[in-house]
Amino acid sequence: MAVVLLALLAAVFIQGATAVRLGLDLRGGTSVTLQPRIAQGEAGKVTNAAIDQAVSIIRQRVNSLGVAESEVTAQGSGVNRQIVISVPGDTGRRVVDLVGQTAELRFRQVLLSGAPTPVSATDTATAAAITASGLSPAVGKKFASLDCTQAVNRQGTGSDVATQPIVACDRSGNSKYILAGAEVLGRQVSKASAAINQSTGSGWYVLLNFNNDGTKAFADLTTRVTKLTPPLNEVAIVLDGLVVSAPRINEAITAGNAQITGSFSQVEAEDLANVLKYGALPLAFDRGEVQQISPTLGADQLRAGLLAGFLGLGLVLLYSLLYYRGLGLVSVGSLIVAGSLTYLLILLLGKWIGFTLTLAGIAGAIVAIGITADSFIVYFERVRDEVREGRSLRSAVETGWVRARRTIIVADFVSIIASALLYLLAVGGVRGFAFTLGLTTLIDLFVVFVFTKPIVTVLAKLNFYSSGHPLSGVSAKSLGVLTTPPTAEKGA
Amino acid sequence: MSKLSGLGGRLYRGDTSIDFIGKRRRWYAFSGLLIIASAVALSLQGLHLGIEFKGGSSYTVTKTGISIEDARSAVATTSIPGEVIVQKVGTNKVRVQTGSLSVLQSNAIQDALAKKFGVTTDVIDTQIVGPSWGKEITRKALYGLFAFLIVVLLYLAMAFEPKMAAAAILAVIHDVFITVGIYALVGFDVTPATVIGFLTILGYSLYDTVVVFDKVRENTRTITSTSKMTYSQAANLAVNQTLVRSFNTSLIALMPVGSILFVGAGLLGAGTLKDLSLALFIGLATGTYSSIFIATPILAVLREREPAMKALAKRVNARSVGASVSSGVTTDTQTQVVDAGKRGPRNQPKRKRRR
């Protein structure tokens, strides 16, 4: 036992794992959970490979924030896999914006464009244009009232329906458009990269390559519109419902590539290229949960968790001592050993597998205090039963152990099954809880076998216990052992 | 305390005995009542689901002297559709809960609150949950529940015996159902933390049941050869013998959970700790109850149906009739096994008197 403790302690020092890695709910930060699903109109399944690809793309984006210890991981297994993004500190909104982009890229023909400010619905020029384009009056009304100078209208919704005409703002708020149904979609993009205009040395743009379907669709679209009059010969590149640029198409593009220009900075161009790669995945992500916790709340929660832990531990220790007297000392010792083991392991696991302690994890550990103490009670009660049967304490300790051992193993095993299943099937906080609960249950088994039992064996040899001292917890009086052998009564 | 220990000794020898199995109908009826109440509460009121299940957003601003009215007026300026709930949490926090919002609307609320209370948006604790998220975690919780029940059923069937596994699982289902019912009845918020609590109850409830069943198994190992007790009597003795143990383990398990509840509800006002520990607290209580009053009686009834146990019950009854004149009054019912079980263990003088 001592060897194990020392070994762990040594490992802690060698690895330099001196601080518990705290979860975001304990130190403040933002976490976003994304739920992958098959994008609308796509066939097939959410594959692990696709999710891993998405994870690496999102990681790239999150890393661009430059926040240390940001994490992007896939959690869960099979169809349950989710992507969890955690960024410590107070970068909340930027993270959410960054990963929340669904990156629905669409190429739509421009039907009508105009100044960004709203016009009255009865504006004759607009009305005439709408009638001429054969659009429904509802769309016309929407177009007329849209105010693209308001930042709120330029956030991008990503909720546009591909086949329907839409009303959209320009990304920079310089104009607004009515756009036809999409003819080329983001998933028809096979490659996207940022490039710089070689001749001028400035002016970043994004280079797109289409797959076979995309090449054909884009060729059809560009061939058709070149012959039309402005603005009908413009094709808008729409990202998440916002027009990135709407270049005039001068000649049919049949080679299967396109450029998105729009006075990008290098970072913007690279980000956009990433976003487009992401959009090329046959996956869409539902923003499952976003949690932003300020460092103050984190500190409060940590304090509360620790307080609850010490309070719970204190109560259990007090009760053990009051009820089991001398034997209670054994549970005090065992709990202390189990507690130190848990602490050391949490330190080491933080280093080895990046385990972070969350509030739910602390709760799991506190709940485990009860389970650990339960094992001692099961054993002590067994020993006391054996003494009631008329055995000496020393033999009771051994026979009681044989019987209690089985109960403890079965009961702990059920607990371990529960935590393993919880861990595998759940995400986020539940996993943290399941992990510490499982870990501490294993520690409980270990401590009962390697520490508690040997200690009780040693103590049973001491006169204080074997003579049944009133404070030993195994005195005849406290056990209710009668002077007549109990077996005789039972035979009646 | 020593009085209680003395009770332990008396319970162990059977001097003091509580007839759990003989009076099982009473406990069944009590549980049945609870289950019906739970079902009614569930169907009429349903569960009070947190935003994690319905989808929605929650913003918590911490500032001394904060008021609900200010928060409400700040939110009003954003013209957010749907119902907005503004609550005070603790002394200096206000929580605003809304329905599902877009990123844009969410940012607008954050900005409005930040402006109103003169804080930056980064210190507003925010939680945004997509509308489909709840379905997802509900589905996962249910998967977890079923997987757990099946695996544990198999494990207990191997470690003990199939009928014990069945009885234990029935007791667990009973616990979860009643706990959920209490939530519906009282209208406590159900959050993912609550679900974690529910799932943990499974493990806890089984821990108690395992302890009792282990003793039952030990007591019943030799009953067919000695013919001194029926299965039910031996099982009842086991429950009595482990009563102190069950009481202690449950009490000790409740202590840490109680402290989480105290700290979570008292200091933090709301959140993970409170939700988790409340579910655990209620579940633990029902778990202890069911392992004593439900699981063991069900096991006894299941086992008493076996021909070997029927034969044993007959032999034991025959012996007790021969040995004791007073039990002669019940001879007419001895042919029926259930009645033999209902008579309870021999060491139950109270019960006999009542007959």
Image (cartoon, coloured by chain):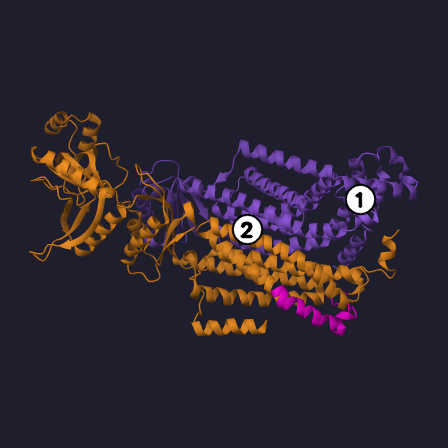
Image quarter for residue B342? top right
Image point (57%, 37%), residue name: B185
Asked if the stretch drawn in magenta spans residue A460, the answer is yes
Using the image as rendered, state which of residue B60 and residue A242 is in the foreground.
A242
Amino acid beneath label 2: Ser
Task: Look at the image and give the colour of chain B.
Answer: purple
Q: Is residue A63 visible?
A: yes
Task: Tell me where residue A79 sits by quadrant.
Answer: top left
* Identity, as a three-letter code, of the amino acid under mark 1: Thr
Q: Nearer the viewer, mark 2 or mark 1?
A: 1
Where residue A318 appears, as percent x and y from the top left, is: 65, 63
> Dividing the picture into quarters, in which one does residue A114 lie?
top left
**Numbered badge on residue B277:** 2
Quadrant of the drawing holding the N terminus of chain B: bottom right
> Image check: B174 left or right of A79?
right
Q: Is residue A251 left or right of residue A15?
A: left
Which is the main secondary structure of the residues drawn in magenta?
A: helix
The residue positioned 73% from the left and 62% from the top of the image is: A400
Q: Secondary structure at mark 2?
A: helix
Look at the numbered disc 1 and give the secondary structure of its residue. Answer: loop
Q: Is residue A407 left or right of residue B14?
A: left
Q: What is the span of residues highlighted in magenta in the rendered image?
A: A447-474
Chain A shown in which color?
A: orange
Q: Quadrant of the C terminus of chain B?
A: top right
Res B119 seen here? no
Give the residue at x 89% y 35%.
B329
The x and y percentages for residue A16 are 43, 72
Above or below for A465 versus A250: below
Tell me which residue sits at (14%, 40%) in the image: A175
Residue that label 1 marks: B230
> Is residue B349 covered in magenta?
no
